[in-house]
Every structure is written in C-alpha cells, then in structure tokens.
C-alpha cells in the first residue's frame, strides 16, 4: 500500500512540475504589490488569526516584503509538518499504544511517509522561493498540502484515527493554506 502512495506522489509531483513548466519563467521578478503582514493575512480566507499569530511570531516578519512573509509562512508549515512526522514515527513505534490495530498501524506508516514527503516539498518550496521560482514554490506548497489531505482521507476508515491525526492534519493543512495564499500574493498584479 505504501508503494502505491509513492507512485501517486510521483505522478502528482510530475504533473505539478509539468504545469509549472508551462507557466511564466520562474525567475521573473515579482509583479505584485507589497503586502504588510496584516494585509497579507486578510487574504487567507478564514485563517487571519492563525496567519497573524504565525507570522508575527517571527521577528523578521516585521520588516519583510511579501516574499519574506511567504518564506516565514512556508517555514512555519514545514516545522509543523516535521513535528507531525516525528510524532507519527514515535506513535508508530510505541508498543504501549492501546488498541493499535493493523489498520491503524498501516495508517500511521502511510501518513508518516506522506509527512516526510510534505516536509521535503516545503523545504524545496523555501529554496524555490529564495531563488525567485515563485510558481515552483506555489506548486510545492500545494503538493505538501495534498499529502496532508491524502493522509487524512486515507485514514478516515480507521477507527480511532480522529484522536491520533485529525487535529494535527487540520493544523498543517491550515498552515499550508496560509503559506500558499501568501506565496500567490507575490505574483498578484497590483
């Protein structure tokens, strides 16, 4: 089952890269307006408070341009996804977890792989952003968010998954949504 997730992930990543290749050059200068932290967070469709709390927690956000705010948001999503991957690894290996069925164990393993992929994609998204490849950065953030959603969907039939994953998946998904929205603002025409 894990290998089928890997194949889907590879295909999804290929499609994202192909879509990105069809878009304007990745090193094009940003054409969007400069957003303040509050203005950028107002664009995040229902995640304003999370956005403000996340971005203002990093001192560099006070003087950051839109790309700098996107970087802070992506790094916050990456940290949270990394913490979730570590958590999944620890509970997967925890023999004392009550009622850990084979189905739950498979869910944890699959989600662990998905979160490892998400962390890698968010790390790559930061590199792409730093090099001016804004379309690629957007695609990588979207791909990492898709991994989180696939983790959630893949475990819905597992009894007790809600107690283990739903809150963490929701938080990473929301942080990815904030990061994606702000990254898109870089190229939004003024």
Image (tube, helix red, strand yellow):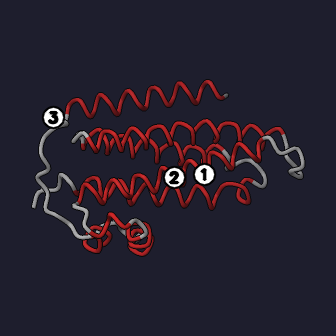
The numbered mark at residue 83 is 1
Assess whether mark 1 and mark 2 are in contact (beta carbons under 8 angstroms).
yes
| Residue drawn at x 36%, y 30% as measured from the top left | 15
Task: Indicate the quadrant where residue 57 lies.
Answer: bottom left
Q: Which residue is mark 3?
A: 25
Task: Indicate the quadrant where residue 134 lies.
Answer: top left
The quarter of the image holding the C terminus is: bottom left
Left or right of residue 84: residue 24: left
| Percent x, y of residue 25 | 15, 34
Mark 3 or 1, nearer chain start: 3
The residue lying toward the viewer, choosing from 111 and 38, is 38
Q: Crowding near pointer 2: few (<14 within 10 Å), some, many (20+)? A: some
Q: Secondary structure at mark 1?
A: helix
Left or right of residue 133: residue 173: right
Left or right of residue 67: residue 155: right
Assess whether mark 1 and mark 3 are in contact (beta carbons under 8 angstroms).
no
Q: Secondary structure at mark 2?
A: helix
| Residue drawn at x 29%, y 53% as measured from the top left | 183
Q: Is residue 188 above or below residue 146?
A: below
Assess whether mark 3 and mark 2 are in contact (beta carbons under 8 angstroms).
no
Q: CA distance from mark 3 to mark 1?
A: 34 Å
Q: Which residue is mark 2?
A: 79
Q: CA distance from mark 2 to mark 1?
A: 6 Å
| Residue drawn at x 26%, y 34% as measured from the top left | 20
Task: Indicate the quadrant where residue 22 lies.
Answer: top left
Mark 2 or 3, nearer chain start: 3
Q: Is residue 42 above or below residue 146?
A: below
Q: CA distance from mark 2 to mark 3?
A: 29 Å
Q: Crowding near pointer 1: few (<14 within 10 Å), some, many (20+)? A: some
The residue lying toward the viewer, choosing from 109 and 79, is 79
| Percent x, y of residue 38 | 29, 74
């Amino acid at each position: 089952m894990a290998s089928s997730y890997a194949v889907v992930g590879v295909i999804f990543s290929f499609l994202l890269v192909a879509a990105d290749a069809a878009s304007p050059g990745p090193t094009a200068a940003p054409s969007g307006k400069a957003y303040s932290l509050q203005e950028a967070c107002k664009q995040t469709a229902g995640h304003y408070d999370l956005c403000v709390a996340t971005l203002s927690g990093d001192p560099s956000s006070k003087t950051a341009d839109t790309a700098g705010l996107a970087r802070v948001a992506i790094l916050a999503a990456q940290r949270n996804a990394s913490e979730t991957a570590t958590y999944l690894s620890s509970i997967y290996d925890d023999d004392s977890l009550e009622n850990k069925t084979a189905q739950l164990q498979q869910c944890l393993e699959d989600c662990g792989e998905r979160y490892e992929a998400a962390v890698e994609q968010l790390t790559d998204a930061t590199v792409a952003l730093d090099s001016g490849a804004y379309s690629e950065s957007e695609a990588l953030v979207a791909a990492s968010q898709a991994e989180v959603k696939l983790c959630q969907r893949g475990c819905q039939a597992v009894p007790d998954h809600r107690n283990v994953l739903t809150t963490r998946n929701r938080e990473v998904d929301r942080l990815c949504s904030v990061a994606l929205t702000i990254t898109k603002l870089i190229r939004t025409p003024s």
